[in-house]
Amino acid sequence: MKKTLISLATASLIASSAMAADKGIDIVVSGQATVYYETHSENGNSDDQTMFDQDNSAANVGIQLNLGADLGNNFTFGSQLTYLGTAGLEKNLVAGVKQHADDAIVQEGDTTSEIALTKIFIAKKIGNTTVKIGRQELPKSLSPLAFSEGWNVYKNTFDAILVVNSDIPDTTVVAAYVSGGTGISGLESTNDLGASVNGKYKDSNGDVNSLNAPLEVNGEAYMLTIQNKSIPMTTVTASYYTLDNVNGDDNFVNDELVRVISNGGSDTDAYWLDIAVADKSLPMGLKVGAQVGHMSTDDMTGNNGENFKFSDTTVWGLRASFVPMSNLTLSTAYTTVNAETDKLNVAFKNTGTGVKTPLFTQMIYNQDAIALDATTLMVKGSYNAGTYGVITAAYGNTDAGAANLMGANEDYQEFDLTYKVNYANVQYFAAYVYRQIDNGGNMNATSGSAQDVTEDNRFRVWARYNF
């Protein structure tokens, strides 16, 4: 006989499943099991720790269970339970985790703290319109500034109301109300959306000060996306966001509690346009793309008389890829994000996590370098060896400006080498990452690192079994 320990959330879902079964509703079960490990070494660590040392390593063992049901009358139900633990790896191999389901990174003996309810929603289809209410994923292709990221152990989710309509030929219209998200490091609770800001502001005496800090969206966020495929070989996606009641967080200025009081907070409006051209008739599998974004934030006033003036942030980028020979794909991408040196500037990042960007030049770890006051060029090559997997090499170089998140005028470069293969119904992934920044820059490496880290070597490996 097997003995099972379950949390209150698990028990509730099991009880719901039993009730559904009594009413003749079938519960569809799927999920995945994951093992995830990452280690690194850097120059500037006073303890002289190297790659694979316990203090420089993190890992997770996780299981996600999806429960879905057709409730009849075009209603559907979905939920997802996520377990995130270490299987005891913290005792001899790692010092922490990449992702957690509780504020405590490792809480030994407390099984309930390792479980999170990462999805729960109801959806209703009416004609060509689907309405989805609850905790859910948002794809980057339709929500470029508030999306679920797939690089960590499991994806982050959002508390949202989503409406998708396809009445117009060749067109998908998506409207969303988003109140918050789980973030990507911790899945235990939902938090306000946010953004990163960097630049200059004036205090109550008129003196100019530097600021590199987060913003919080204490109100709601609204999104409207229209995706159209009427133009031959072309997909056009246009998005508009409005973020209400944007404030500084508790550490907005010099680690002091400074809440902006300009009408309870300011508003941020953002626009995004993505154009993708691809067709089998194009020579050598040519694909090209362009992206343009614009973000505008109202000026704010601080409790202590600070004058926060924001510049508009604009980004544009180009991308092209082609297949010169069988199984080999080559690509290049270019992006530039502006900033003004005498104002505050908002970075183009995922407002749900504050981590990744929607930019063409996004690599494994370069988000802070490319998101603001930066011009970036990336080249990539990928070879598909069929059953032997796919190997990809990418190099990115960023020319940084004065308001760059990683340091004023501190240029950054990164090299990624990845390998992915499916074997025996398990997907395996391995990556080596080399990062380098000019002296004086902030590498934003893991905790315990010195601030003068200019080089970082990382190794990541994971395995996933989908069932």
Image (cartoon, grey):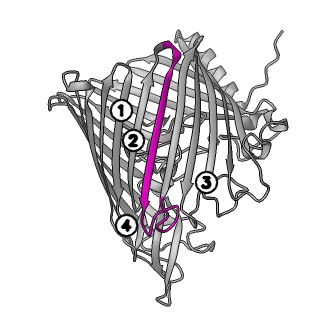
Let me know if residue 100 is in the magenta part: no
| Residue name at image x 80 percent, y 38 percent | 90
Q: Which residue is mark 1?
A: 330
Mark 1 vs 2: CB contact within 8 A = yes
* The C terminus: image quadrant: top right
Q: Residues within 10 Å of mark 1 (few under 14, many from 20)?
A: some
Where is residue 442 shown, x and y percent of the image?
A: 58, 62
Hey, which quadrant is residue 309 in on the image? bottom left
| Residue name at image x 41 percent, y 37 percent | 380
Let me know if residue 393 is in the magenta part: yes
Tell me which amino acid carries mark 4: Ala
Q: Which residues are magenta?
A: 387-411
Q: Which residue is mark 2?
A: 379
Mark 2 vs 4: CB contact within 8 A = no
Total of numbered circles in the picture? Answer: 4
Q: Is residue 434 above or below residue 400?
A: above
Q: Residues within 10 Å of mark 2 (few under 14, many from 20)?
A: some
Tell me which amino acid carries mark 3: Glu
